[in-house]
Image (spheres, rainbow, N blue to C red):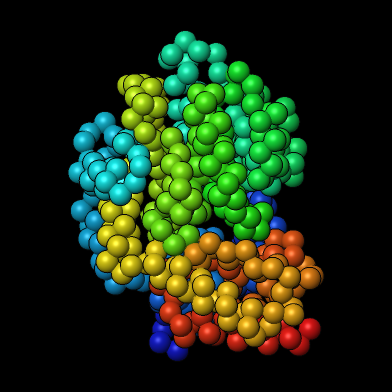
Amino acid sequence: MMQKDNGVDFMRMEDIRELDRACFMNTFGERTPVAFDRGEGMYLYTTEDEKYLDMFAGIAVNSLGYNHGEFTKVIQEQAGKLLHTSSLYYIESQALLAKKLVDISCADRIYFANSGAEANEGAIKLAKIYFYKKGIEKYEVISLKSSFHGRTLATVAATGQEKYQKPYYPLIPGFKQVEINDIEALKAAVTDKTCAILLEPVQGESGVHPVDDAYIKEVRRICDEKEIILIFDEIQTGIGRCGKMFCYETMGVEPDIFTLAKALGNGIPIGAVCAKQFVADAFQPGDHGGTFGGNPLATRAGLCVLDIMEKENLPQNAEKMGGYIENEIMAKCTDKVKQIRRKGLMIGIEMYEPAADMRKKLFEKKILVGAVGNTLRVLPPLIIGKDEADEFIKAFCELAMSN
Ligand SMILES: Cc1ncc(COP(=O)(O)O)c(C=O)c1O
């Protein structure tokens, strides 16, 4: 332990890294060499008080930024009252959050989980049990190549990336993937056993790839015609990130089921399966469950997040600031950018070279972003203002132009 001038104990990054190497399972490899201790608004501070501008929001989780006054107060208050009871008993905030989500979305019923993968598991189970209860033999799930749906065995089987699947062969049967925005490939994959089509409205992890409006309308039509459940994975796109509370609202189609996680809890783990009545009815007592899902802390957090999102017009801010960042970058350093793909504040800046280099240089300038292939992933908290956006744009364009 080291001590700051004010007497506060802290661990140096190197010491934390050493402990991590000795005791933590090595699933993350070499991490970005920094350990954060606290946050304020758009900024994170290390154990050694260095300040970083966060343009990645803990992978699209911290949409209210850090230490948001009202959110912090609500969490503190709830922590002092009650954290967990289990769903053996009724929970006020669980019922209220379910009602709130029903009121503001196309869903009629909600189930709460603890993570994105677990929410997707619930959605896949719901689609399967819907046909099982009808006595119809449909169990296949079609998802998209380059998708990401989580790390559990069913969601790995749905994730269209071999690197995540290969170590776990044989995968759960019944899953197949087709190219994004290729309607003929999708039609060819549909069989009389297809129970669900699962997709992200904008693929996040593989570098911000939106589905086309015409494609998604045709997918909806096929699902209606063939009695297939359409599931949107809105774990990254949902809760304001794409300019509306839910991304499907920007697309002119409604899913039968959609899933949420990440920003719904602003850092408190929570996931949600949101479904239309006809399919939700398939879950009956004993069909699905979990110990923690929808506990008092997580659902109080979710309620508070939605309230603040609405009061502070954060979905609108996402569209406004996303447009601003895109326009400024295209005006200031367009030659260095191959393409910007964007919906709200889900931004992919495709470069002409591996984006990991740019991510590293931005990190040296104390700005956090993500990178995959040649695409820089920019997912700031939705509270971002012009000053912080300008700080990022200036640093990005200076680095890009000096290349
Ligand atoms: C679209 C999408 N689905 C599912 C997941 C998995 O969520 P979790 O990591 O909370 O299990 C992620 C996580 O990045 C995601 O981006």
> Foreground residue, 36 or 345?
345
Q: Residue at x 51, y 77 (%)?
A: 324
Figure quadrant of the C terminus: bottom right
Q: Position of residue 60 (x, y in %)?
A: 50, 60
Horizontally, residue 140 falls left or right of residue 129, namely: right
Q: Residue furthest top?
A: 135
Q: Position of residue 76 (x, y in %)?
A: 27, 62
> Foreground residue, 183 or 83?
183
Residue 75 seen in render:
no
Q: Quadrant of residue 219?
A: top right
Q: From the viewer's perspective, is residue 17 above or below residue 234?
A: below
Q: Residue at x 44, y 36 (%)?
A: 257
Horizontally, residue 313 falls left or right of residue 242, namely: left
Residue 199 seen in render:
yes
Q: Quadrant of residue 41?
A: bottom left
Q: From the viewer's perspective, is residue 84 above or below residue 403?
A: above
Q: Residue at x 44, y 62 (%)?
A: 243
Q: Position of residue 13 (x, y in %)?
A: 60, 73
Horizontally, residue 162 falls left or right of residue 239, namely: right
Number of marks: 0
Q: Residue at x 58, y 74 (%)?
A: 326
> Foreground residue, 394 or 323?
323
Q: Position of residue 360 (x, y in %)?
A: 70, 75
Q: From the viewer's perspective, is residue 165 above or below residue 82?
A: above
Q: From the viewer's perspective, is residue 102 above or below residue 236?
A: above
